[in-house]
Image (cartoon, rainbow, N blue to C red):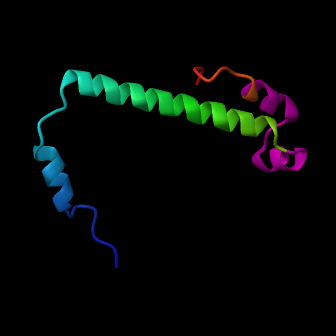
Amino acid sequence: MTQPATHSHPHMSYLNSRPALPVLAQVAVAFAVMVTKWSTRQRTRRQLRHLSAGQLKDIGLSRQDAHYEGTLPFWRP
C-alpha cells in the first residue's frame, strides 16, 4: 500500500534543516549538473544518428529530423 503524498519523510526534514551550501559548492554542483546534461545530450544524439528507419518511425521522426537533431552541438538544447 502506498503512503499518502502529504506524509512527510524523516529524511526530508533532515535535509530541510541543513544550512545552505557555500557559494563555491553551489557553483560546483551547478557545473556538474551542466556537464552531465551536455554528456547526456551528446550520447543520445549520437545514438539517434544510428537508429534504423523502423526505429525512427516508431518514435515519429524522419531521417532528416534525426539527422538535424543528431548533428546539433552538445551545448544546444
Q: Which residues are magenta?
A: 52-69
* Residue 66, x across and y down, in percent: 79, 33
Q: Nearer the viewer, residue 71 or 66?
A: 71
Q: Is residue 65 magenta?
A: yes
Q: Is residue 77 above or below residue 11?
A: above
Q: Is residue 11 above or below residue 61?
A: below
Q: Is residue 16 left or right of residue 48?
A: left
The N terminus lies in quadrant: bottom left
Q: Main secondary structure of the magenta part?
A: helix
* Residue 13, x across and y down, in percent: 14, 53
At a point 86% along the width and 34% down the height, the residue shown is: 63
Residue 48, by quadrant, is top right
Residue 49, by quadrant, is top right
At a point 12% along the width and 42% down the height, the residue shown is: 18
Q: Nearer the viewer, residue 49 or 6?
A: 49
Residue found at the far bottom of this picture: 1
Q: Is residue 35 left or right of residue 24?
A: right
Q: Nearer the viewer, residue 2 or 47?
A: 47
Q: Is residue 66 above or below residue 15?
A: above
